[in-house]
Amino acid sequence: MKEVRAVFPDGSAEIMPTPNAVRKAQDMGLDLILIAPTAEPPVAKAMDFGQWQYEQKKKQHEAKKKQHVIQVKELKFRPNTDDHDYDFKRNHAIRFLKEGNRVKAIVQFRGREIAHTELGKKLLLRFADDLAGIGAIEGHPRLEGRNAHVIISPVKPGSAPKERPERAKEQTPAPTVGTQA
Protein backbone atom coordinates (compact mmCIF):
# COMPACT_ATOMS: atom_id res chain seq x y z
CA MET A 1 0.00 0.00 0.00
CA LYS A 2 1.51 3.23 -1.15
CA GLU A 3 -1.22 5.57 0.04
CA VAL A 4 -4.06 5.41 2.55
CA ARG A 5 -6.96 7.64 3.43
CA ALA A 6 -6.02 8.45 7.03
CA VAL A 7 -8.84 9.47 9.39
CA PHE A 8 -7.81 11.23 12.59
CA PRO A 9 -9.70 11.76 15.89
CA ASP A 10 -10.31 15.45 15.17
CA GLY A 11 -12.40 14.40 12.14
CA SER A 12 -9.90 15.31 9.46
CA ALA A 13 -9.21 12.84 6.65
CA GLU A 14 -6.23 13.00 4.31
CA ILE A 15 -4.84 10.84 1.54
CA MET A 16 -1.16 10.42 2.34
CA PRO A 17 1.68 7.91 2.00
CA THR A 18 1.39 5.06 4.50
CA PRO A 19 4.65 5.77 6.40
CA ASN A 20 3.64 9.42 6.91
CA ALA A 21 0.20 8.39 8.22
CA VAL A 22 1.79 5.91 10.67
CA ARG A 23 4.25 8.55 11.87
CA LYS A 24 1.49 11.16 12.36
CA ALA A 25 -0.65 8.66 14.37
CA GLN A 26 2.35 7.73 16.55
CA ASP A 27 3.02 11.43 17.21
CA MET A 28 -0.54 11.62 18.58
CA GLY A 29 0.13 8.55 20.74
CA LEU A 30 -2.26 6.37 18.69
CA ASP A 31 -2.08 3.39 16.34
CA LEU A 32 -3.05 3.38 12.65
CA ILE A 33 -5.68 0.67 12.09
CA LEU A 34 -6.76 -0.49 8.65
CA ILE A 35 -10.57 -0.17 8.62
CA ALA A 36 -11.52 -0.73 4.95
CA PRO A 37 -8.75 -2.57 3.07
CA THR A 38 -10.80 -2.99 -0.12
CA ALA A 39 -11.58 0.72 -0.57
CA GLU A 40 -9.62 2.75 -3.09
CA PRO A 41 -7.40 4.03 -1.48
CA PRO A 42 -7.62 1.85 1.68
CA VAL A 43 -9.05 3.59 4.75
CA ALA A 44 -7.02 3.65 7.97
CA LYS A 45 -8.04 5.25 11.24
CA ALA A 46 -5.83 6.59 14.01
CA MET A 47 -7.07 5.22 17.34
CA ASP A 48 -6.02 3.22 20.39
CA PHE A 49 -5.70 -0.41 19.23
CA GLY A 50 -6.58 -1.88 22.65
CA GLN A 51 -9.75 0.22 22.85
CA TRP A 52 -10.69 -0.79 19.29
CA GLN A 53 -10.23 -4.49 20.11
CA TYR A 54 -12.37 -4.12 23.22
CA GLU A 55 -15.18 -2.46 21.24
CA GLN A 56 -15.07 -5.18 18.55
CA LYS A 57 -15.34 -7.95 21.16
CA LYS A 58 -18.22 -6.12 22.84
CA LYS A 59 -20.09 -5.82 19.50
CA GLN A 60 -19.59 -9.53 18.80
CA HIS A 61 -20.82 -10.44 22.27
CA GLU A 62 -23.98 -8.31 21.86
CA ALA A 63 -24.69 -9.82 18.43
CA LYS A 64 -24.25 -13.33 19.83
CA LYS A 65 -26.67 -12.57 22.68
CA LYS A 66 -29.45 -11.58 20.30
CA GLN A 67 -29.25 -14.59 17.98
CA HIS A 68 -31.39 -17.67 18.56
CA VAL A 69 -29.92 -21.04 17.63
CA ILE A 70 -32.58 -23.34 16.21
CA GLN A 71 -32.31 -26.85 17.55
CA VAL A 72 -33.91 -30.06 16.36
CA LYS A 73 -35.74 -31.76 19.22
CA GLU A 74 -36.45 -35.48 18.84
CA LEU A 75 -39.54 -37.31 20.05
CA LYS A 76 -39.56 -41.10 19.80
CA PHE A 77 -42.68 -43.21 19.39
CA ARG A 78 -43.47 -46.87 18.83
CA PRO A 79 -46.12 -47.99 16.31
CA ASN A 80 -48.60 -48.83 19.06
CA THR A 81 -48.02 -45.83 21.35
CA ASP A 82 -50.85 -45.33 23.85
CA ASP A 83 -53.08 -42.23 23.65
CA HIS A 84 -51.83 -40.73 26.92
CA ASP A 85 -48.18 -41.09 25.89
CA TYR A 86 -49.01 -39.64 22.48
CA ASP A 87 -50.75 -36.61 24.04
CA PHE A 88 -47.85 -36.09 26.45
CA LYS A 89 -45.32 -36.04 23.59
CA ARG A 90 -47.59 -33.87 21.42
CA ASN A 91 -47.68 -31.26 24.21
CA HIS A 92 -43.87 -31.32 24.36
CA ALA A 93 -43.75 -30.80 20.60
CA ILE A 94 -46.10 -27.81 20.88
CA ARG A 95 -43.81 -26.27 23.49
CA PHE A 96 -40.71 -26.91 21.33
CA LEU A 97 -42.34 -25.35 18.26
CA LYS A 98 -43.47 -22.28 20.22
CA GLU A 99 -39.87 -21.83 21.40
CA GLY A 100 -38.84 -21.73 17.72
CA ASN A 101 -37.19 -25.17 17.53
CA ARG A 102 -37.81 -27.86 14.94
CA VAL A 103 -39.26 -31.23 15.98
CA LYS A 104 -38.22 -34.60 14.57
CA ALA A 105 -40.79 -37.29 15.33
CA ILE A 106 -39.41 -40.82 15.06
CA VAL A 107 -41.29 -44.11 15.10
CA GLN A 108 -39.02 -47.01 16.04
CA PHE A 109 -39.86 -50.49 14.79
CA ARG A 110 -38.52 -53.47 16.72
CA GLY A 111 -38.68 -57.11 15.81
CA ARG A 112 -41.76 -58.05 13.81
CA GLU A 113 -43.17 -54.51 14.01
CA ILE A 114 -41.20 -53.67 10.84
CA ALA A 115 -43.87 -55.59 8.87
CA HIS A 116 -46.39 -52.85 9.79
CA THR A 117 -44.63 -49.68 8.66
CA GLU A 118 -47.98 -48.24 7.57
CA LEU A 119 -48.95 -47.92 11.27
CA GLY A 120 -45.87 -45.78 11.91
CA LYS A 121 -46.50 -43.55 8.91
CA LYS A 122 -50.15 -43.18 9.93
CA LEU A 123 -49.04 -42.13 13.44
CA LEU A 124 -46.59 -39.56 12.03
CA LEU A 125 -49.24 -38.07 9.74
CA ARG A 126 -51.67 -37.86 12.67
CA PHE A 127 -48.94 -36.13 14.70
CA ALA A 128 -48.30 -33.62 11.89
CA ASP A 129 -52.05 -32.94 11.54
CA ASP A 130 -52.36 -32.29 15.29
CA LEU A 131 -49.58 -29.69 15.03
CA ALA A 132 -50.93 -28.10 11.83
CA GLY A 133 -51.59 -24.63 13.31
CA ILE A 134 -48.22 -24.41 15.04
CA GLY A 135 -45.88 -26.34 12.78
CA ALA A 136 -45.48 -27.18 9.11
CA ILE A 137 -44.34 -30.59 7.94
CA GLU A 138 -41.14 -30.76 5.88
CA GLY A 139 -41.72 -33.54 3.38
CA HIS A 140 -43.48 -36.85 3.86
CA PRO A 141 -42.69 -39.46 6.52
CA ARG A 142 -39.57 -41.36 5.46
CA LEU A 143 -38.50 -44.86 6.38
CA GLU A 144 -34.79 -45.27 7.03
CA GLY A 145 -33.75 -48.65 8.35
CA ARG A 146 -35.95 -49.54 11.31
CA ASN A 147 -37.10 -45.95 11.90
CA ALA A 148 -39.68 -43.76 10.19
CA HIS A 149 -39.37 -40.03 10.78
CA VAL A 150 -40.81 -36.66 9.86
CA ILE A 151 -39.50 -33.15 10.59
CA ILE A 152 -41.85 -30.34 11.60
CA SER A 153 -40.78 -26.68 11.52
CA PRO A 154 -42.41 -23.87 13.48
CA VAL A 155 -44.83 -21.61 11.61
CA LYS A 156 -44.30 -17.89 12.09
CA PRO A 157 -47.23 -16.20 13.85
CA GLY A 158 -49.51 -14.29 11.50
CA SER A 159 -48.66 -16.37 8.43
CA ALA A 160 -51.63 -18.47 7.42
CA PRO A 161 -51.13 -21.57 5.31
CA LYS A 162 -51.96 -20.99 1.65
CA GLU A 163 -55.11 -22.59 0.33
CA ARG A 164 -54.46 -25.27 -2.22
CA PRO A 165 -55.69 -24.53 -5.76
CA GLU A 166 -57.67 -27.81 -5.92
CA ARG A 167 -59.87 -26.59 -3.06
CA ALA A 168 -60.56 -23.30 -4.81
CA LYS A 169 -61.77 -25.11 -7.95
CA GLU A 170 -64.16 -27.29 -5.95
CA GLN A 171 -66.06 -24.31 -4.59
CA THR A 172 -68.88 -23.29 -6.91
CA PRO A 173 -70.28 -19.79 -7.00
CA ALA A 174 -73.67 -19.17 -5.44
CA PRO A 175 -76.55 -19.24 -7.94
CA THR A 176 -77.75 -15.85 -9.03
CA VAL A 177 -81.37 -14.94 -8.59
CA GLY A 178 -82.87 -13.12 -11.51
CA THR A 179 -86.09 -12.62 -13.32
CA GLN A 180 -86.92 -15.03 -16.01
CA ALA A 181 -88.68 -13.80 -19.08
Image (tube, helix red, strand yellow):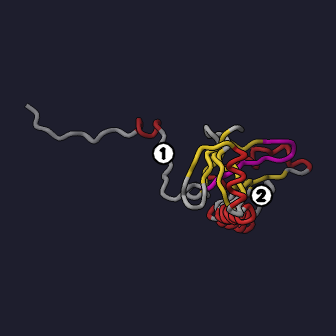
Q: Which residue does the image show at 62% across and 56% down from the upper left?
A: 154
Mark 2 surroundings: few (<14), some (14-19) or many (≥20) residues within 10 A:
some
**Mainly helix, strand or loop, the magenta region?**
strand
Foreground residue, 176 or 38?
38
Residue 93 seen anywhere in this rendered image of the structure: no
**Residue linked to disc 1:** 162
Q: Please, is residue 35 above or below residue 172 in the view?
A: below
**Residue at the image point whose x is 65% and y is 54% from the top:** 45
The amino acid on which the numbered mark 2 sits, given as a three-letter code, is: Glu
Quarter that holds the C terminus: top left
In the figure, is residue 153 to the left or right of 119?
A: left
Instruction: Write down the quadrant of residue 59 in the picture.
Output: bottom right
* Numbered disc 1: secondary structure: loop
Number of the label disc, if any, that sits on residue 74? 2
- Give the residues in magenta: 143-154
- Between 55 and 24, which is closer to the camera in this rendering? 24
Q: Is 172 on the left-hand or right-hand side of 135? A: left
